Amino acid sequence: RTIPESLDAALRAHGLRLTGPRRVILEVLRGTESHPTAEWLYRFVRRRLPRVSLGTVYRNLRLLVAE
């Protein structure tokens, strides 16, 4: 699945960019029916971005929730 332009626009309205890791995190979240943990999300994001860190996943989740 791709991220809709409206989400990109919404992030930009809050002063946020749709970075590569953020895009993949959102795509993985959109592709699940469950309420995943950060660790679960990290495992799936890492399949697409092997160099992403668990800290990056946590920071992005906190940032997205706050906004």
Image: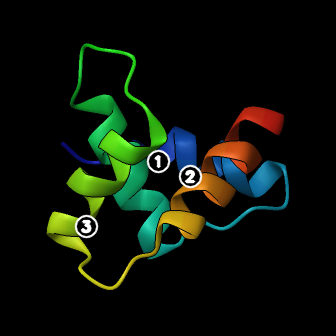
Q: Which residue is mark 1?
A: 5
Quick one: label 3, few (<14), some, or many (20+) residues within 10 Å?
some
Kindly report which numbered mark, 3 or 1, lies closer to the viewer in this rendering.
Answer: 3
Compute the Cα span from label 3 to label 1.
24 Å
Q: Which residue is mark 3?
A: 46
**Which mark, by number, is residue 8?**
2
Answer with the quarter of the image where residue 64 lies: top right
Horizontal and vertical percent position of residue 7: 55, 41
Asked if disc 3 and disc 1 are in contact, CB closer than 8 Å, the reply is no
At x 59%, y 67%, the residue is 55
Number of numbered discs: 3
Quick one: label 2, few (<14), some, or many (20+) residues within 10 Å?
some
At x 57%, y 68%, the residue is 56
Quarter of the figure with the C terminus: top right
Front residue of 10/62: it is 62
Asked if disc 2 and disc 1 are in contact, CB closer than 8 Å, the reply is yes
Compute the Cα span from label 2 to label 3.
22 Å
Please tell me which of labels 2 and 3 falls first in the chain.
2
